Amino acid sequence: MCSYLFVSMAYGILMEESGFAWYYSLLVSLTVYTGAFQFVLTTLLSASASIVTIAVTAFFMNSRQIFYSLSFVDDFGSMGIRKPYMIHTMTDETYAVNCTLELPDAEKKQIMFRVAFFSRCYWMIGAVIGGVLGQLIPFSMEGIDFCMTALFVIIFVDQWEKADNHFPALAGLGIGIICLLIFGENQFMLPALIIVSMLLVLYNVRKMGTAV
């Protein structure tokens, strides 16, 4: 709740700074609901970018969700009418929380749904508060969008501390840096995810083969 409220408040303030009232922040959060891209979307909307540009940018920025969802295909598939909502509300933060749940199947699905629902509520409430505060704060809020980067760092550190095996994290960092240097900051995400996923699949197959 604390992380979502403060980051979404930063988003609401940024939207207001760009000339969009608080209800635009609420509308975008209600329909788009992808924190990192919402920050970028603010810039795209301010620049009057085309729908095609926005759609392509959204696809590449959020392509990582395809890989996240592989971890919960069975869980979401058996959640009935809640399945579409769980897919729509999958974020980096809810994914990180769901990966730590060690509960009986029925209880786990209830907790996953509540995490998704309340996280979305926190984000929308924070976006509205930020939009209102943005009208009241008299000084420039340049650089406030760094809150999203800080949140990703916190999630990474939390997962690092809980994990016994750090190979996936180190592989992700190394390949991410290499792809960043090769493809540039706007296009490195998708190839990095593909390469990391392939590497981890091979690593797990080899690990299981060794165990057998």
Image (cartoon, helix red, strand yellow):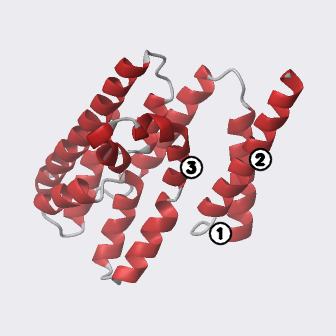
Asked if residue 68 lies left or right of residue 207, the reply is left
Residue ID for mark 2: 199
Q: Quadrant of the C terminus?
A: top right
Q: Position of residue 110 (x, y in %)?
A: 31, 25
| Circle 3 Cα neighbour tier, 10 Å, few/some/many (<14 / 14–19 / ≥20) | few
Q: Is residue 84 visible?
A: yes
Name the disc covering residue 93, or none.
none
Name the disc covering residue 67, or none.
3
Q: Position of residue 107 (x, y in %)?
A: 35, 18
**Of the two numbered discs 1 and 2 in the rendering, the one whose residue sits closer to the viewer:** 2
Secondary structure found at label 2: helix
- Residue at position x 24%, y 54% in the image: 29
Q: In the picture shown, does residue 175 fall above or below 157?
A: below
Residue ID for mark 1: 184
Q: Earlier in the sequence, mark 1 or mark 2?
A: 1
**Of the two numbered discs 3 and 1 in the rendering, the one whose residue sits closer to the viewer:** 3
Q: Nearer the viewer, residue 144 or 107?
A: 107
